[in-house]
Amino acid sequence: MSADLLLHRIPEAVRTAAEAAGFRDGELLFSVRSDLDLQGGGAEVWTIVSPTLIASFVVSGESAGAVIGPHAFAQVEKVRARQKVGSSFLTLRIDGLYIEIARYSNTRREYFGRVAIFLQRRIEGKTLPDSYLEKPSELICPVCRLPLPGRGAGCPRCLRGRGIFVRTLGLMRAYWMSIIALLAMMLAGVGLDLIPPLLTRTLVDRVIQPRTHLDWLPIILLGLVGASAGRALLNIFIGRTSSIIGTRITRDLRERLQKKLLSLAVDYYNRNSVGSLMSRVLYDVDYFQSFVQQVAQGFLLNLMLVFGIGAMLFYMNWQLALLVLLPIPFVVIGTTFFWRNIYPRHYRVWDSQSKTAQLLSGLLSGIRLVKAFGQEQREEQRFSNAASYLQRSRRNLETSVATFNPIMGFIFGLGGLIIWWAGGKRVMEPNGITLGTLMAFFGYMGMFYGPVSALSMFSNWVTGFLSGGQRVFEVLDAQVGVTDRIEPARLPAPRGRIEFRNVTFGYDPYSPVLNNVSLTIEPGQFIGIVGKSGSGKTTLVNLLCRFYDVQEGQVLLDGVDVREIAQEDVHRSVGLVLQEPFLFRATIAENIAYGRPDASPEAIIAAARAANAHVFISRRPAGYDTRLGESGAGLSGGERQRISIARALLCDPRVLILDEATSSVDTESEQEIQRALARACKGRTTIAIAHRLSTLKNSDHIYVVDDGKITESGSHEALMELNGTYAKLVRIQTELTRLEV
Amino acid sequence: MNEAVNTSPAAPLFDDERLANLGIRWLIPAETAIFEGSFSLLHCQVQGDTLYRGVFAVLLFPVSHPNHLISLRYQDAKDKEQEIGVIRDLSQFQPDAQKLVRDNLRKHYYELTITRVFSVRHEFNLLFFDVETKTAGRREFVMPWRSDRTEDYGQNGKVLLDALDNRYLIPDVTALPANDRRVFTRFIYW
Ligand SMILES: Nc1ncnc2c1ncn2[C@@H]1O[C@H](COP(=O)(O)OP(=O)(O)O)[C@@H](O)[C@H]1O
Ligand SMILES: [Mg+2]
């Protein structure tokens, strides 16, 4: 970064031009380098800032030599970093017009953002220290320049990040005893596998061919039976143990995933589709079971087999053993080539599965919309496309597997023929091998190629496992976004004083939605918030509930920064009723008692009464035991809202937030709810966001939000007196009500 | 049966053309002057309206209609973004006006178009790309291996967002050379 920012110095590359424009080394604030010219071509451009002047000089690129500016600071009204798509501009407002002074790619966005704030503060008469500009990046590791997994997170390279494999082995640590037992059983199993061909050799060479030792026959047979019975027994135990470990690990992982999903900030769900998250919890976790199986019955076992059998072959006859190795290069090359081509097909199967799941979950949750717009046919078509994509990708995968296996079988068969030919000759030769040895060779060979080809598939299996593991760890590693302090402040029973202090916040940190908002709400006040849709009302609520954290300023509850308070306490003391009430598939009573499952029926009725829901609930045949369908099907919009108000009231929160909570009930019930709420809300801090201004008339204080700022505030009367936006809105609405009547 | 009833379908209440005229101001060449004014900023004057200074253009359908439906906007006195109107078909304007709007659009959008994918390496859960771009030559960039770092672009295209949110566009993945495609879809398979 140092090379991109020079304090008090003109960069040599533009010295002549800069001096000609009136810049002098000693009188400079700083020079900062960007990577684009204004037209978006790659270029080296220096923006030089002195206390009086600002200008940019293009060093290289198509517009080399061009100078932008200089502009006198005295004329500049504002400095802004303007985010466009993929790049940004540093702009100056002069005479009401924004003039571009420099353009930069998103790589440089972080420190140009600081430059803009630094200059803006200067215009406002505040001077930030030089160290503000020199702060190390929060996005890139200062040591190795690797991008960090999150703002200010540790660097995976410098912290010796653990790979997916090591982490998976870490997951298995809890089962180390079973795993050691597993390994011991495998070793014993390999030993048992090696016995039968040896017994066959003895049988042929000592009993059958010379026709002697007939009494050995039953003993040898018994040995063979014993070996295969032992093997079968071991297989049973190995299979059971690995399945116990595998299913445990996958269950652990599923639970951890679900827990993690619950802890992730709301923001995460804006970025990731429900379908893809579901397929991770449901399917990707299974890769970890296959990992355990690979360890137990795959990789290690095959490795031991290859070495054990190889050693036996060479021990019996090294010349023949070399011949056995002959087809191996073909097997390895064939398998490697095959899997290199097959693995992408695995990905595609995963992709098609996840897309189908996404489509289906979207379709089923929007089923009423589909029917209302009569789009069943199109949805059928879309699903049929997805289903045939799934079919194609599976067929693609399976046909290649179906082609590959017989070909490999053929190659193995060729290996056998070589041994028949060479080994057969050896048996006939005077000093050659015995028939029994040849038989044993065939025995071992039959067990040899399988593990070899399995081993050649291993690296590709690894790729598949890595991608599945990656998708699981991606969720587990996701930045929670909103976290508790190590020792959070406890605030079990706050009084409900709320303060926003110079809050600036944007869902995208580079384009703020709230700008320097300050407001104070005293305990027990009834506050109204009004403003156009999209003005930032819900965003205020999101910050208060700590679904997101502010970028600048503070949100305080009872004088304590909400970031310091245990989230549990914040959520318990703030009750939230949303415009879109969400009801679970359960009874009405269970839905009302969601936040307090232990609530008594009396309390549930009281809460329902307060929310003006008691009457319509009790008219239902099953009363409070009425089962609701998916997301509250069977109730009207207003009824759903009233149930969600009851749900919030039952938790007896200190602070109650109604975010357009009464917007879908008619005026009359709204007034009833208001009256009920007024009773229920006595002593509670209540924040009501509403479109219908009549509902806010009796508020202690009303804030008008416009474009992320508070533009007016005061009581209803004071605001009417002010004759601003609020008064205008009230007049319009009164007109409308008159029209309705 | 009741044959007196007229069974021919009711005429549509409005067709797309009438719908289009409800509420959007279409900027047509006859009524709209687009020119370069003070500080070389884009200016726009619509008949019977004030002069707008510091105008910028935004594509409303950047993927599906990159040459049509261009919104002209400005920043009002309170720094709020406002729309002047929408150009349906830029090619109907004078060549110099077209050029001004196109140049302005180039300022709004910045993404590098990838023509070749030489290699993709995976480490630390990051993908290290080595690619050829159309305008900026050979480039290397680093992208977290996460599905939310890519955006779909039309039928077969993808936009990759690197770790610092720079945008790299592959307009059609199936049009990449076969080997590049294999390298690419090995990691970006969704
Ligand atoms: N999750 C989100 N991600 C990005 N932008 C958002 C998100 N939620 C809201 N916004 C934007 O923030 C602004 C304020 O939204 P909001 O606070 O919901 O307005 P309202 O006053 O209608 O409640 C809007 O411009 C909206 O587009
Ligand atoms: Mg809202």
Image (cartoon, grey):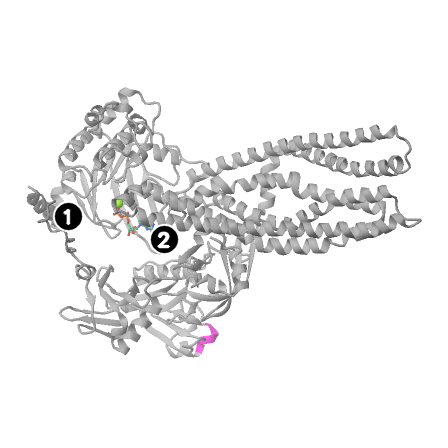
What amino acid is at disc 2? Asp
Residue depicted at x 81% and y 46%: A313
Q: Nearer the viewer, residue B127 or A99?
A: B127
> Is residue A423 magenta-colored?
no
Residue placed furthest toward the right: A430
Q: Nearer the viewer, residue A338 or A566?
A: A338
The residue carrying mark 2 has its beta carbon less than 8 Å from ligand 1: yes
Residue B155 location, x and y as percent?
40, 59
Dividing the picture into quadrants, the one containing residue A191 is: top right
Q: Secondary structure at mark 2?
A: loop
Determine the chain carrying the residue at label 2: A
- Residue hosting label 1: A726
What secondary structure predominates along the stretch shown in magenta?
helix
Determine the chain carrying the residue at label 1: A
Q: Residues within 10 Å of mark 1 (few under 14, many from 20)?
A: many
| In the image, residue A48 above or below residue B78 | below
Dividing the picture into quadrants, the one containing residue A41 is: bottom left
Apparent side of residue B137 relative to residue A327 in the rendered image (left or right): left
- Residue hosting label 2: A508
**In this rendering, does residue A98 appear at all?**
yes
Which span is picked out in magenta? A11-15
